[in-house]
């Protein structure tokens, strides 16, 4: 686990890209996403998908986020990282069996996985921001 637990990145489903400067992303108490431009009033942004860091690093030291695609030992077996609310944990779901309830693995600190891409672009990356709004590029 890393000490900087509350980090996120924001995917814009309409524009098909990660936003740079995600320090402008805000959530209200109901989980509605807003985008703040300067001193203007926040704008509801339903197309913005906020993905939280798991607080874990892959075997190469890269931060793992919700929505990342990872591999374990076999590069053909791709897993999506997701938050399973009722289990209160991050899990891996094998991509080719996405609708099969039997193919889930708990993501934990000693699991040797590697981030290879994400569910949106098929590429690794995206701007990230800690909860204080300091935007950083992932390692």
Image (tube, helix red, strand yellow):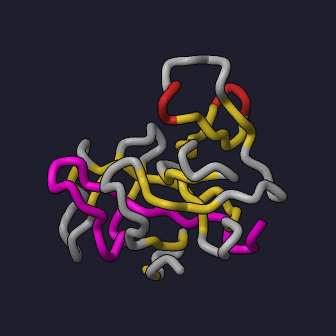
Residue 65: percent from left, percent from top = 55, 57
In the displayed structure, would residue 28 be above or below residue 91? Answer: below
In the displayed structure, would residue 7 be above or below residue 118? Answer: below
Q: Is residue 37 left or right of residue 59?
A: left
Residue 117 lies in quadrant? bottom left
**Who is closer to the viewer here, 7 or 74?**
74
In the displayed structure, would residue 39 be above or below residue 74? Answer: below
**Who is closer to the viewer here, 42 or 65?**
65
Residue at 56%, 66% in the rendered image: 7
Residue 110 lies in quadrant? bottom right
Residue 41: percent from left, percent from top = 21, 61
**Region rendered in magenta:** 1-25
Residue 20: percent from left, percent from top = 30, 74
Residue at 50%, 61% in the rendered image: 116
Residue at 75%, 59% in the rendered image: 112
Q: Is residue 39 left or right of residue 71?
A: left
Where, quadrant-wise, is the N terminus in this rendering?
bottom right
Residue at 63%, 31% in the rendered image: 85
Residue 34: percent from left, percent from top = 30, 53
In the displayed structure, would residue 42 be above or below residue 66? Answer: below
């Amino acid at each position: 686990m890393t000490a900087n637990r509350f980090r996120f990145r924001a995917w814009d489903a309409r524009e098909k890209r990660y936003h740079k400067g995600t320090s402008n992303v805000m959530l209200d108490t109901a989980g509605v996403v807003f985008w703040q431009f300067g001193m203007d009033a926040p704008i509801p942004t339903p197309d913005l998908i906020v993905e939280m860091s798991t607080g874990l690093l892959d075997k190469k030291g890269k931060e793992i986020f919700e929505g990342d695609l990872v591999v374990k030992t076999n590069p053909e077996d791709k897993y999506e990282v997701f938050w399973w609310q009722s289990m209160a944990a991050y899990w891996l779901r094998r991509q080719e069996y996405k609708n099969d309830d039997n193919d889930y693995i708990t993501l934990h600190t000693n699991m040797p996985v590697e981030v290879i891409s994400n569910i949106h672009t098929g590429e690794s990356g995206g701007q990230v921001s800690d909860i204080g709004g300091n935007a950083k590029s992932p390692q």
